[in-house]
Image (cartoon, grey):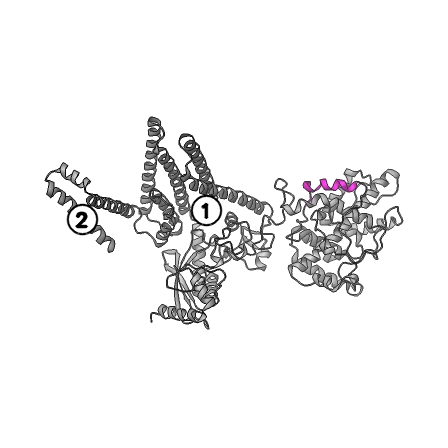
Amino acid sequence: MRTVLLTGLSFVLTGAVIGNAYYQKKQFYPSVVYITKSNPSMAMLYIQAFVFVILMGKLMRKVFFGQLRPAEMEHLIERSWYAVTETLSSLHTEDRIDYMERSPVISLLFHLRAITLITLLGILDLYFINHAYYSTLLKGASVQLVFGFEYAILLTVLFMAFVKYILHTLDAQNENPWENKAVYLLYTELVLGFIKVVLYMAFMMIMIKVHTFPLFAIRPMYLSLRGFKKALHDVIMSRRAIRNMNTLYPDATAEELQAGDHTCIICREDMIEFSKKLPCNHIFHTSCLRSWFQRQQTCPTCRMDVLQAPRPQQVPQTPPPQQQQPQQPQMPQNLFQGFAGMPPIPGWPPQQQPVQQPGTSGASTTGTPATPTTPNTPGSGTSTVSATGTHPSTTPPTSVPNMPPFMPPMFPFFMPYSGQGMPLPPTRPEGLTDEELKVMEGQERQNIEARIQWLRDIQCLLDGAMILIQQYNTVASQSSIPNINLSGTPSNNTPTDTNKASSSREKSTESSPVVNNDRDLDKDLSDLEGATGYTPPTEEMIPSWEDPSQEEHEDEQHEVRRRRLEKFSQPSPNNHIVKEKAATD
Amino acid sequence: MAGSALRRLMAEYKQLTLNPPEGIIAGPVNEENFFEWEALIMGPENTCFEGGVFPARLAFPPDYPLNPPKMKFTCELFHPNIYPDGRVCISILHAPGDDPMGYESSAERWSPVQSVEKILLSVLSMLAEPNDESAANVDAAKTWRENRMKFEEIAAKTVRKSLGI
């Protein structure tokens, strides 16, 4: 109401000014001169021009947009902070095209308006660019240069809007939602971001060369650079997460879907097929997960960072996150000290804190030699395997048949031991303080971590024992002492052969011959009694890691322990086999 | 995307109408546009906002479950965590990744697991227990902290105003 009044007033006043001038001077030319000479009249005319511009804007809006929605209004006000008048209509177009996505029904009028507007703005932009270009060519660098670049930038924005429009139109024509749309949008954004950055760079260069440092361009340039960097980062991270999803995470099985709530928490629809399970055991639709990963690379439910989580070794070109890498070289050394210490010591030295030992994830890759050293308790041996091999946040899955990235650290194993840094052997359970025991009880994360730490230390030691056996084998093969037969591999082990042997052993522990191996090795180890430099690990030497009163409740305890571990280990097909094996035992 | 956002909003609408949580009514402003909702929030009991009915608007982004909606009270509300213009400042309404205040960890922010219902429940508990440590309305936070009597007086006034008395 007030605006109408103000507009009317300005019209009346302008009319009065012009009428007055004409009344006084009677002729056209003198009255124009009179008006331009008089300051109040000029001010009035300026105001009138301003009113005209606003009216024009309103008219355009009426034609192309119709009623502005409140959200658009808000957006407009938000943006107007740094929006120049020319940009407004372009930004506007984008907003309106975003609206396409939300509205269930889109009228023909909408299409007509959108297309006309885009074409019109495009032509206008092109015209201005053209104009600026030629005027620069003809008259040399002038203010037109700035305008030219400004319009070029606008054109990219417009182009983005156009691409969005096309994508939305295509999407609207399909019945089912179009999964890849977000990907295309992401890439368009990336490309346009790049173009913008290049444009600003070129603009900077030219301006610095021709004129002076264009201070006013710093802000938009910074913004576009930041936008580009973000787009690039997003693309890289999301690609990585999606590749992880496609290659690593298992499809959710029907039982898993049946067992839990089978509603996808992202879209709130039932999951029947095409769903994936994350390392944290949460299940989602593949498509929903993909679009979420395009924004964030975390589990929607528990926010576990999927890129920080165990990176399986099958993907050597993307190195695993930092915390794993620096530890790899230490691994062999770590092993050795324990080695040097292990054979002569019948019991574990007390008062040591195994919990503080670094959890070398590499340890698990050397396989699962837990089985031979705990011959009487096959259950515990196998459950150790399933626990260490599958803890979601620390150790990669056991299914690593070929593990190229971790092979190199194995070679130093075959050097004579050099006696430094290895996880200290765990204390006997009796020697543990109450606090230490408490740390390992309970269902909290830290408790479980502590437990797994124990298991891992034990595994590390066992790995060491395996290597000793292999070393013995290599020596024995040259001096015709009976070999220890490792899962049926040829007894003539050269150092490289032992590599193979150990990796084949991993496979075998995961598949059927687990139990047989136990027995074989057990026998072989007893053959070995008294061999130089090696005492076979007998029952007294290797204390069970958790329960001191194991004799009575052994089976019961194992059952409990195994169930507990099962709960926290992530079941993968391989582990199922192992566990089933253990169960049948 | 459009379809899935729409479907999810429809599902949430259905859920909210079938099992409405106590003290909350919410639904699209009109059935043609599911991306603009109106919500009515009742002042929680035993707080200074008890008895009030506060209208709010929710605006959903086109990629809704992946990005949070925006929420704004359309009535006057003097509260430490509501901006003077009505926008609500709670952590689960902030898109993950960017933290405007550099204050909360990403674990508290938006994820597709959240829903309209959860947002509104969070707002309810925010009304009941203002967090004056990250204030959106500094005056309100100051009054809340230093002059509880006055805060309650103002709250009572807004309650009466919201009921049209």
Label placed on residue A13: 2
Name the magenta segment's main secondary structure: helix
- Using the image, name the chain to which the residue with label 1 belongs: A
A65 vs B17: above or below: above
Left or right of A222? Residue B75 is left
**Residue A78 picture location, percent across and down:** 38, 51
To which residue does mark 1 refer?
A178
Task: Tell which of A377 and B98 is nearer to you.
Answer: B98
Q: Assess whether residue B61 is covered by the magenta stretch.
A: no
- Are the two marked residues, 1 and 2, in contact with CB atoms closer than 8 angstroms? no
**Which residue is pictured at 59% across the width and 45% down the height?**
A247
Q: Which mark is residue A96?
A: none
Toward the viewer: A159 or A215? A215
The amino acid at mark 2 is Leu
- Dot 2: element: helix
**In the image as oriented, which residue stretches furthest toward the right?**
A530
Q: Position of residue A163 (x, y in %)?
A: 41, 41
Residue A28 pos. (x, y %)? 13, 38
Quarter residue B49 falls in? bottom left
Q: Is residue A400 magenta?
A: yes
**SS at badge 1:** loop
- Relative to residue A291, is residue A124 drawn left or right? left
Q: Residue furthest bottom?
A: B46
Residue at 77 percent of width and 38 percent of height? A496
Amino acid type shown at disc 1? Trp
Quarter of the rendering occupied by the C terminus of chain B: bottom left
Residue drawn 15% across the image and 44% down it: A18
Q: Compute the Cα span from label 1 to label 2.
A: 57 Å
Quarter occupied by residue A122: top left
Q: Which residues are magenta?
A: A399-414
